[in-house]
């Protein structure tokens, strides 16, 4: 399964265009931000959590405006430099991180995503160079293209329903 520490990365560099303001800093009913909840949800499963794509966190690599792949690339290179075996990712708008998800994602060690939630993934640190190459090429830099390139495994967790937060009103009925 894994043989070493795991880095957690909250991908938080999006533009929040549908949300209308900085989604990561939106507050849930308990007063904590979505970003706070994302970090808290990921923390029990990893040795360290980094925030990607925001001031005070890891800068997107190789530069800004690359979407989630810029943050993932920064996290993969951080993982390599600090001897993490891989990176578990989540989006800043994912306030819940199921306890059984890491085991399902890491599985056989290959890159893996949760069906329908491509930012919830497992990425071996050895993919850093491959992602550098992918980002250097002419392509849409879509997370879907990257998933296809590395032939990421897609796992389904039966019965798991996670919130989709795209607008402020999506926060109203979330359980805390």
Image (spheres, rainbow, N blue to C red):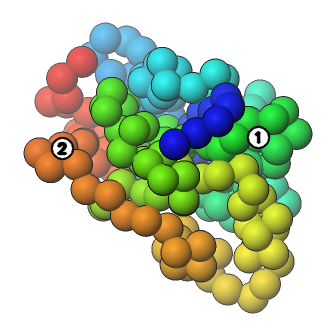
Q: Which mark is residue 70?
A: none
Q: Position of residue 63 (x, y in %)?
A: 83, 59
Residue 105 screen position, x and y as percent = 42, 48
Q: Which residue is mark 1?
A: 79
Q: Report whether 37 appears left or right of 51.
A: left
Q: Secondary structure at mark 1?
A: helix
Q: Residue at x 48, y 53 (%)?
A: 108
Please give the name of the residue rendered at 22% of the width and 49% of the height, measured from the top-left corner: 157
Location of residue 11 by image quarter: top right
* 160 left or right, relative to 32: left
* x, y percent for residue 8: 60, 33
Identify the residue position indicated by label 2 in the image.
160
Residue 129: image quadrant is bottom right
| Front residue of 163 and 88 | 88
Against 60, residue 78 (above or below) is above
Which of disc 2 and disc 1 is earlier in sequence?
1
66 vs 9, nearest the viewer: 9
Quarter of the image for the C terminus: give it. top left
């Amino acid at each position: 399964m894994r043989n070493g520490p795991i880095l957690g990365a909250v991908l938080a560099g999006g533009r929040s265009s549908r949300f209308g303001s900085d989604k990561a800093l939106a507050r849930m009913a308990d007063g904590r931000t979505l970003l706070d909840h994302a970090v808290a949800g990921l923390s029990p499963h990893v040795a360290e959590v980094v925030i990607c794509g925001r001031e005070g966190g890891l800068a997107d690599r190789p530069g800004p405006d690359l979407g989630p792949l810029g943050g993932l690339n920064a996290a993969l290179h951080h993982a390599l430099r600090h001897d993490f075996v891989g990176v578990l990712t989540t989006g800043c708008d994912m306030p819940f991180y199921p306890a059984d998800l890491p085991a399902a994602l890491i599985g056989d060690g290959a890159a893996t995503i949760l069906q329908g939630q491509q930012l919830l993934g497992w990425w071996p640190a050895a993919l850093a160079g491959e992602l550098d190459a992918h980002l250097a090429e002419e392509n849409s830099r879509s997370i879907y293209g990257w998933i296809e390139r590395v032939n990421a495994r897609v796992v389904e967790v039966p019965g798991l329903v996670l919130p989709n937060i795209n607008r402020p009103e999506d926060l109203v009925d979330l359980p805390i």
